[in-house]
Image (tube, rainbow, N blue to C red):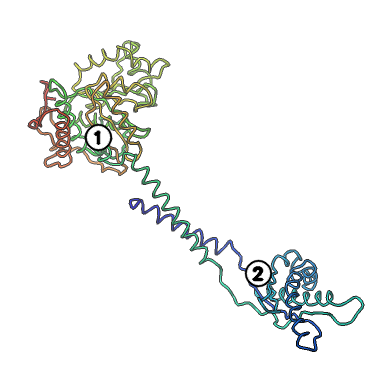
């Protein structure tokens, strides 16, 4: 909950401001003016009679309180005020309370201003005295048995401020409660969400190969101008780790050449990561083919002129004719998804895809496939079976740990997962590739740059993980080779 202190602070501020605004501008202040009536009983020449009269007067106080708030008194008082307030409104603003163990009746009336509250109270008190006098006087004449005497005139209420302090306190208290609830809910959600490298590794038992910032590069400029590609060092480190870790997991100690990138979650951005990775590897002098493997029309080349007429869908259907579906852009070759056809997605499962990839291995050093996200179709499983290795991309705070764990397990049923790439919400820094850090084919280095602690630590973590799972002790660090220096 402490991690989300900002939610508590924000809720308190919003609640306090809302309470302050409500108290200042949406609540009215009623000023109250009070008058006091003394109830007395007539007669009584002896002590006994006086005592009986006093008990009689005390009993009359409760009755007079009902009279003071009656409709008749309110109507007469409204007429006396010349219609300044309706009888119903005046009655709703009037209260009459006897003072305990006395013959005193307090009549209070509220009003929108001190002057009106005083005039309302004076009218109600006066009419109460007159109605009591009429009711207590016998129809045959004579003196009244009891009466009410106005002995304390209503005063002018003191000026009171708006109740903004009370409502502000209420708003702050309510905001605090809401903020704590929100913080608890966010903390509970965080426990089941992939938010950092630790949760990613715990969910998959595979290393996080790179932490990248989100970036989308127009596919038309990919391979032509790579100066705006972010995380160049991290991408080069990702290339080296794939070569190293993939070679160790291959029985023939060969580095993976057909690499698939798939995502977990709708906004993982696996296609963008695959495109940036392919462009980075191509900049090192390798021949790289970037394949848009999403034939449903939602891939990295969707909606562009590259996929308008030809692409992977036409290659699989053998309908390319004499047109070359491969697009050369600088040092990178792109195979778009091609036009979407009703049977295009089904063709991914056909044996033709495996034959096409085998032929492409002879032409390119690396084949990078931007696969559909996991769960959208079964195509990613097919690509996992045909690829040398798969990289799973997940966006921080977007995918659940269960979804990531299940996706990796599904891929490992048919293929190999090298590791994951975590896309964080923090923007990366645009940096042009540095010639001194260029990863030349056949280089003996593993780190993306000298002294790279993150890459070295990842390698150590992976080797330790392999040792714990019975893969043998860690061998000396070296770059695996397939005979071509890759």
As measured in the structure, the alpha-carbon distance from the residue carrying label 2 to the one carrying label 1 is 72 Å
Toward the left, the furthest residue is: 476
Sequence-first tag of 2 and 1: 2
Q: Position of residue 280 (x, y in %)?
A: 21, 32
Name the mark on residue 483: none
The residue tagged 1 is: 226
Q: Quadrant of residue 380?
A: top left
User: In percent of the image, x 20 and y 33: which residue is there?
Assistant: 238
The residue closer to the viewer here, 156 or 137, is 137
SS for callout 2: loop
Q: Which mark is residue 112?
A: 2
Image vertical order of residue 93 relative to residue 364, above or below: below
Callout 1: 10 Å neighbours few (<14), some, many (20+)? many
Residue 104 found in image quarter: bottom right
Task: Find residue 200 and report its horizontal and vertical position in percent.
Answer: 27, 37
How would you rate the neighbour count of disc 2 (Cα within 10 Å): few for under 14, some for 14-19, many for 20 or more? Answer: few
Q: Nearer the viewer, residue 50 or 478?
A: 50
Q: Position of residue 323 (x, y in %)?
A: 32, 14
Q: Residue at x 31, y 22 (%)?
A: 381
Residue 45 coordinates in the image, percent (x, y): 80, 89
In the rendered image, the residue lying farthest to the right is 140
Q: Is residue 77 left or right of residue 384?
A: right
């Amino acid at each position: 909950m402490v991690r989300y202190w900002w939610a508590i602070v924000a809720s308190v501020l919003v609640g306090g401001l809302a309470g302050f605004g409500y108290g200042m501008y949406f609540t009215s202040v009623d000023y109250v003016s009070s008058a006091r009536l003394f109830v007395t009983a007539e007669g009584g020449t002896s002590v006994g009679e006086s005592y009986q009269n006093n008990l009689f007067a005390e009993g009359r106080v409760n009755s007079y309180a009902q009279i003071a708030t009656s409709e008749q008194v309110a109507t007469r008082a409204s007429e006396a005020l010349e219609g300044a307030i309706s009888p119903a409104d005046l009655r709703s603003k009037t209260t009459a309370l006897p003072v305990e163990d006395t013959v005193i009746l307090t009549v209070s009336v509220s009003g929108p201003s001190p002057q009106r509250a005083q005039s309302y109270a004076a009218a109600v008190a006066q009419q109460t005295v007159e109605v009591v006098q009429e009711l207590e006087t016998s129809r045959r004449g004579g003196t009244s048995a009891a009466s009410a005497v106005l002995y304390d005139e209503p005063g002018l209420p003191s000026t009171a401020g708006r109740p903004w302090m009370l409502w502000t306190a209420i708003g702050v208290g309510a905001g605090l409660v809401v903020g704590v609830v929100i913080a608890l809910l966010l903390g509970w959600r965080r426990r089941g969400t992939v938010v950092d490298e630790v949760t990613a590794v715990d969910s998959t038992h595979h290393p996080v190969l790179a932490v990248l910032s989100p970036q989308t590069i127009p596919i038309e400029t990919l391979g032509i101008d790579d100066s705006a590609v972010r995380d160049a060092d991290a991408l080069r480190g990702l290339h080296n780790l794939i070569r190293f870790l993939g070679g160790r997991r291959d029985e023939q100690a060969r580095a993976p050449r057909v690499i698939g990138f798939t995502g977990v979650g709708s906004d993982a951005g696996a296609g963008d990561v695959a495109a940036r990775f392919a462009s980075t590897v191509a900049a090192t002098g390798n021949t790289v083919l970037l394949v848009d493997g999403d034939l449903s029309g939602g891939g990295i080349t969707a909606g562009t002129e590259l996929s308008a007429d030809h692409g992977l869908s036409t290659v699989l259907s053998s309908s390319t004719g004499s047109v070359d579906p491969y697009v050369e852009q600088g040092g990178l070759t792109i195979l778009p998804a091609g036009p979407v056809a009703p049977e295009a997605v089904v063709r991914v499962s056909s044996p033709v895809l495996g034959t096409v990839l085998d032929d492409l291995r002879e032409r390119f050093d690396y084949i990078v496939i931007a696969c559909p996200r996991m769960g959208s179709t079964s195509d990613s499983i097919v690509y996992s079976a045909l690829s040398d290795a798969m990289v799973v991309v997940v966006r921080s705070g977007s995918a659940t740990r269960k979804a990531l764990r299940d996706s990796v397990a599904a891929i490992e049923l048919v293929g190999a997962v090298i590791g994951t790439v975590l896309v964080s919400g923090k923007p990366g820094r645009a940096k042009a590739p540095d010639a001194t850090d260029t990863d030349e084919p056949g280089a003996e280095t593993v780190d993306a740059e000298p002294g790279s602690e993150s890459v070295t630590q990842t390698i150590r973590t992976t080797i330790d993980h392999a040792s714990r799972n019975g893969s043998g002790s860690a061998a000396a660090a070296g770059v695996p080779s397939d005979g071509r220096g890759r």
